[in-house]
Amino acid sequence: MSANRQNPTKESKLKAFGNRLKKSIGFGSRRTASPPAVLHASPTASSLATDHGLSTAAAISSVEAADLRAKYKHFRILVIGRANAGKTTLLKRRGTHNIHRAFTFTSNPKFIFHDSAGFEAGGEEELNAVMDFIEKCSNAGVVDDQIHIIWFCFDPDVSRPLLDLEVKFFNEKRKWNVPVVAIFMKFDDLISQVWNRKNTPEQNIVHALNTLQQKFEQPLRNYQFPPCAYVRLDALDKNESDHQKQIGELMKQTAASIDNLALKMLFVTVQQNNLKICIKYAIQ
């Protein structure tokens, strides 16, 4: 069984997932959004919490969070990862990668995205640009201009488990605290890499899961700044694959990674097609 990266249908598989993702969170025609501006005119959620006598933003009451939700209208997501990890196709967006050029989709402009250039082996310049951008956005005085979540896309290639730049990202000292969701793209490709004809399909899947755990998840968990959540995506070209369930898991893990109540409310309410998550956090 050959690896999917040698399979000519790989691109169509990733596009299929991109279409599903766009449907889940309201993607449509792309349009350019205003880039985040580093301003100091409005208080951040943290400063508002302090003004209310609270020690952390997570301590904001439901009433105060609702008030913040009424003021801040956008949820900003940064998508990063190594080159060819599938992050661009995740958003079904082609062209030049410019981390400073934000974009939205007309069907749900409340989600604002930034797509960085892929990390290459030895490419310190790309990593430094990403780190500087995140720090700059974190210092923005307007909550709408801050990066609220980072989707870090990984290519589960057993021959190159984690690049030095990826390790550095999760180990390097930082002045920001943005939650990161690790997304393991092309899990079915990993199954192909570890496939053993002597094993049953179920045994090969278990082998792939163990490989993902040993070579990717466990090392990441041991770093100084590990991801807040882990999601894997697979079988994107097969009709029997529950694509919507996979996307729902990504949305659920993203929501769970946000410890700021106001931002969690914002993320949940700007979704237009994920009723289960909206109900879950409305109850909580």
Image (tube, helix red, strand yellow):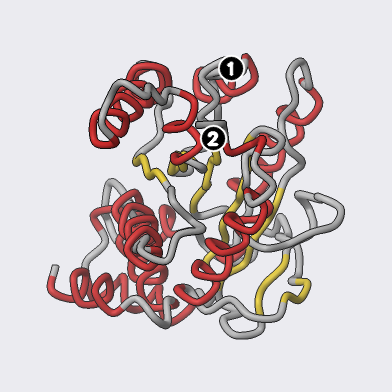
34, above or below 1, in the image: below
Q: What residue type is labelled 1?
A: Arg
Would you say residue 146 is visible in this rendering? no
Residue located beneath label 1 in the image? 160
Q: Are the residues at dot 1 and dot 2 in contact (C-beta closer than 8 Å)? A: no
210, above or below 238, in the image: above
Would you say residue 203 is visible in this rendering? yes
Q: Which amino acid does label 2 sit on?
A: Phe
| Quarter of image, res 141 | bottom right
Question: Residue placed at 57% from the left, 25% from the top?
Answer: 169
Q: Residue furthest right?
A: 96
Q: Is residue 11 left or right of residue 123?
A: left
Measured from the top left, where is residue 234 in percent x and y? 43, 48
Q: Which of marks 1 and 2 is in front?
A: 1
Measured from the top left, where is residue 270 in percent x and y? 44, 77
Which of these two is toward me, 178 or 57? 178
Q: In this view, does 226 lie to the left or right of 146?
A: left
Q: Which residue lies furthest to the left in this view?
A: 283
As measured in the structure, the alpha-carbon distance from the residue carrying label 1 to the one carrying label 2 is 11 Å
Question: Residue placed at 73% from the left, 62% from the top?
Answer: 93
Q: Residue furthest front?
A: 198
Q: Bin the neighbour count of mark 2 within 10 Å (Cα to Cα): few under 14, some 14-19, many 20 and up.
A: many
Question: Residue placed at 50% from the left, 77% from the top?
Answer: 23
Which of these two is toward me, 129 or 79? 79
Q: Is mark 1 on a helix, strand or loop?
A: loop
Q: Quadrant of the C terminus?
A: bottom left
Question: Residue placed at 28% from the left, 24% from the top?
Answer: 199
Numbered mark located on residue 154 in the image:
2
Numbered mark located on residue 1 in the image:
none
